[in-house]
Amino acid sequence: MKFSIITLGCKVNEYESQSIMAQLEMAGHQVDEGLVVADYYIVNTCAVTNIAERKSRQMIAKISKLNPNAKILICGCASQANLEQFRKYNQVEAIIGTHGKHNIVEQLEHIGLLDVPNDYCNTQYAKSTLTRQYIKVQDGCNNFCTYCIIPYTRGRSRSRYLQDILDEIKLSTALEIVITGIDVGDYRINGEKALITLLEEVNKLGKRFRISSIHCGVLTQDFLVRLSKCENFCPFFHISMQSASNATLKRMNRKYTIQQYIDVCNNVKAIFPTACISTDIIVGFKGETEEEFNETVQNLNKIPFSFMHIFPYSVRKGTVAEKLTGDVPSDVVKQRESDLKNLSDKFYNQFLAENIGKTHKVLVEEVKDGYSVGYTENYIYTYIDKQLPSGIYEVVAESVFKDGMKARLI
Ligand code: SF4
């Protein structure tokens, strides 16, 4: 039977889809990715916004069009948050939420759809890739930000065994590892916070690595100093912020003040001068006044950001924020979104300008439009005017080009 896996949403979903692919391949099945012709589709859904959830449902219609006889299994956050929305589709054979992803072959066997070879060996390791590989180290979240459904769909925070993580990295053929999780900063060993210990152990394996989104509270002086001694760490910090107004942060139940956040970012830049710092900002959150938004703009200008992802707030059913009053009119939300996107472009252009003329190490992932392309250690998309096999190359950045920089090999 030929499977295809379709992934929506975050890096953790991407990791888990790779894990599902590995499980199915080990069970002797042919597996592909995306909207390609297959007998059986697994849609790994997302519920982070209403739009993400709608896209998850729309994917079923797209599959139906491509292969009206295919069977579909739905997993992931949208199915955990509200499985009823998927019941009406005839082709959907099973809906398994978030937990069932870890033993997908057993799930399929259980609903009587597959003959599973006897030599099936259960593993959660993701399929290894040649270039960059996500490694999941933690799942779930205890933070309960008022706008977010994730603690309800993925459950409470729990960490993976250190040795299991290291073993997966050792087996990986990837040239770069991305340490990922829902709340990576909450990674624990024996109940104690231990992300820096994990990163120091990962560093010893000799592969270049980076971390996905992290909370500012994790980045203490001690953490940053120890991290700066990890020579394989790529200085890219995506520090989720969501708003730069203390009043808005309080309504979001984010547990830091703007001053704390600013201090952390300045400290990151002091210890990692070439670092790329990015963030996520939600505009138009419930009750966000003109004053609060202006305060956000003023504070954003005080932070050494390289770029920002801007999202208009969209209400999630079942969250605390759903019940808050103070909807912001959609035209105001659009204007705020556009203002902050312009500010992000300004930050990015400044960041690119600072990096021109400097040497970088680029992980070439593919050839696109005649250029070898990939990311520098500090996460700038770089174009090298030469066709190269995948690998890490030392370059000099020569100019700003398309969405990144053009560079030449040293
Ligand atoms: S930290 Fe907040 S936004 Fe992130 S997953 Fe947890 S509850 Fe959601």
Image: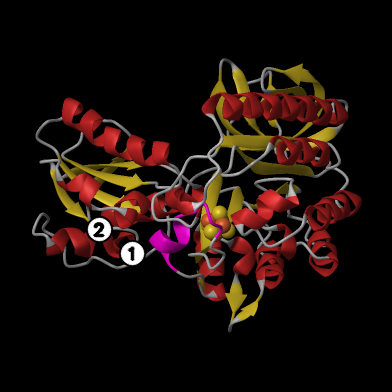
Residue 158, numbered circle: none
Q: Is residue 252 left or right of residue 70?
A: right
- Rendering coords of residue 252 (x, y %): 60, 54
The N terminus is located in which quarter? top left
Residue 99, numbered circle: 1
Q: Is residue 121 magenta?
A: no
Which of these two is toward me, 72 or 140? 140
Q: Is residue 402 left or right of residue 74?
A: right
The C terminus is located in which quarter? top right
Q: Is residue 154 magenta?
A: yes
Which structural element holds mark 2? loop
Q: CA distance from mark 2 to mark 1?
A: 7 Å
Q: Is residue 328 left or right of residue 2?
A: right
| Disc 2 packing (10 Å; few <14; some 14–19; many ≥20) | some
Q: Amino acid at mark 2?
A: Ile
Ligand 1, seen in the image, is in the quarter at bottom right
* Residue 73 visible from this viewpoint: no
Q: Which residue is mark 2?
A: 96
- Rendering coords of residue 9 (x, y %): 44, 43
In magenta, the rendered stretch is: 145-155
